[in-house]
Every structure is written in C-alpha cells, then in structure tokens.
C-alpha cells in the first residue's frame, strides 16, 4: 500500500530533523499544506512519542525562542526585531 504524504512525513521526522521549507520542497507542496500536515501529525503521534519543534536562535542577539507551539517559522526576533532568523526544525522523538 502506498503511504500517504502525512505518513511519509511522519516517517521522515522519526529519523531526522526537517524544516518547513525542506518538507515543502521534498513533497512539492506549499508551506501551508505542510503546516496543516504537521498540525494533524502532532495530534496523531502516539504517546510517548511526540512532535518536537526545535526553535531557531537569533544570530543577531542570541535570543532563543522557548516553547514554540506554532508550525510556521517565526518571522522576526521579538527582542531585536531581526527578520533574518533561521528556520525552526521538526522531529518526532
Ligand atoms: Zn534578536
């Protein structure tokens, strides 16, 4: 049986860390589509596993996001307003 895109994403996240852009490029879909997929995946991952969000650190001031719950990349640093943040990464652990 062919895996659905969400099943494939789950399999990828179990073996590595991926960004929104990498997943969107891999499946040739929009970032919004991947965000929807991740929202479903976060709810369907069976305990004790869970979908982790590894937040970016601001290169400019060193600010580190804590407890990110959103799947879209943060657009700017809340401390110094730097808009060139690295992407956050996702992983299932
Ligand atoms: Zn900053």
Image: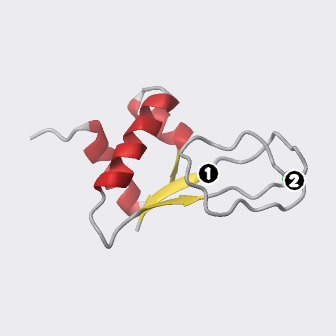
- Report the number of numbered marks: 2
Q: Residue at x 91, y 50 (%)?
A: 80
| Residue 88, numbered label | 1
Query: How many neighbours does mark 2 have within 10 angstroms: few (below 14), some (14-19), or many (20 or more)?
Result: few
**Is 11 situated above or below 28?**
below
Q: CA distance from mark 2 to mark 1?
A: 17 Å
Q: Which sits in the foreground, 23 or 58?
A: 58
Q: Residue at x 43, y 26 (%)?
A: 29
Q: Residue furthest bottom?
A: 48
Q: Secondary structure at mark 1?
A: loop
Compared across the picture, whether 52 is left or right of 75 comes to left
Compared across the picture, whether 89 is left or right of 23 comes to right
**In the rendering, at what x and y percent does residue 77 appear?**
81, 48
Q: Secondary structure at mark 2?
A: loop
Compared across the picture, whether 12 is left or right of 2 comes to right
Q: Residue at x 53, y 45 (%)?
A: 71
| Residue 79, numbered label | 2
Tell me if the residue at label 2 has its CB under 8 Å from ligand 1: yes
Q: Which sits in the foreground, 84 or 48?
A: 48
Tell me if the residue at label 1 has its CB under 8 Å from ligand 1: no
Query: Residue 39 occupies which quadrant of the picture?
Result: top left
**Viewer-nearest of discs 2 and 1:** 2
**Is 55 situated above or below 93?**
above
Q: Residue furthest left?
A: 1
Query: How many neighbours does mark 1 have within 10 angstroms: few (below 14), some (14-19), or many (20 or more)?
Result: many
Q: Report the quarter where the N terminus lies.
A: top left
Q: Which sits in the foreground, 92 or 12?
A: 92
**In the rendering, at what x and y percent does residue 36 appear?**
41, 36
Label whose residue precedes the other's in the sequence (2 or 1): 2
């Amino acid at each position: 049986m062919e895996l659905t895109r969400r099943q494939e994403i789950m399999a990828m996240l179990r073996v590595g860390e991926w960004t929104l852009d990498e997943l969107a490029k891999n499946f040739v879909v929009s970032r919004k589509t991947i965000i929807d997929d991740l929202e479903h995946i976060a709810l369907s991952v069976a305990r004790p596993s869970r979908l982790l969000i590894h937040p970016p650190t601001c290169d400019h001031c060193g600010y580190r996001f804590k407890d990110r719950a959103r799947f879209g990349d943060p657009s700017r640093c809340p401390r110094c307003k730097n808009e060139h943040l690295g992407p956050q990464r996702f992983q299932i652990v």
